[in-house]
Image (cartoon, rainbow, N blue to C red):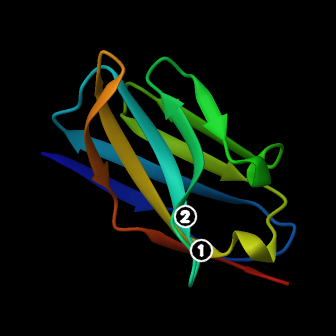
Amino acid sequence: QVQLAESGGGLVQAGGPLRLSCAASGTIFSSNAMGWYRQAPGKKRELVARITSDAITNYADSVKGRFTISRDNAKNTVYLQMNILKPEDTAVYYCAICMLSGGVVIRTTWGQGTQVTVSS
């Protein structure tokens, strides 16, 4: 069993920063990927940023240059630093961890989500 504890959401003005954190606990494979996804009202959940245990990252085009994902493997924690926030970044942000074996996703666990609201 894996549990994810998210924190850091809230209300921020456009142009401002916000930092999300997500700590994983339980049985965690040494090979894994942690990431942030978001879902705005009426839209599908989409990948925001993802980082593997080897520190390989990928980002959605819409956040490149504004968001930075990082992780602390010793703490099994992933961070999302969000800068120059825009109203269109408003969404529920979900943390996820994928357990990998040979590059294949064995299991994915989702956090409960944290609301990010960007006012114009």
Q: Is residue 82 above or below residue 115?
A: above
71 sits to left or right of 19: left
Give residue 70's position: percent from left, percent from top.
58, 35
Q: Residues within 10 Å of mark 2 (few under 14, many from 20)?
A: many
In the rendered view, does 112 fall on the left or right side of 50? left
Mark sitting on residue 38 = 2
The first of marks 2 and 1 along the sequence is 2
Label tally: 2
Residue 105: % across, % down: 31, 32
Callout 1 environment at 10 Å: few (<14), some (14 to 19), or many (20+)?
many
Callout 2–callout 1 Cβ contact below 8 Å: yes
Pick the front one: 15 or 52:
52
- Residue, disc 1: 91
Q: Residue at x 31, y 44 (%)?
A: 24
Q: Quadrant of residue 53?
A: top left
In the structure shown, which secondary structural element does the residue marked by tag 2 occupy? Answer: strand
Answer yes or no: is residue 8 visible.
no
Q: Is residue 86 left or right of residue 104?
A: right
Residue 16, visible in the rendered structure? yes
At mark 1, the secondary structure is strand
Q: Quadrant of the C terminus?
A: bottom right
Q: Is residue 78 above or below residue 15?
A: above
Query: Disc 2 versus disc 1: distance between alpha carbons?
Result: 6 Å
Query: Residue 75 location, x and y as percent?
Result: 37, 33
- What's the amino acid at mark 1? Ala
Kind of residue at disc 2: Arg
Decide: is 108 above or below 71.
Answer: below
Asked which quadrant contains residue 27, the reply is: top left
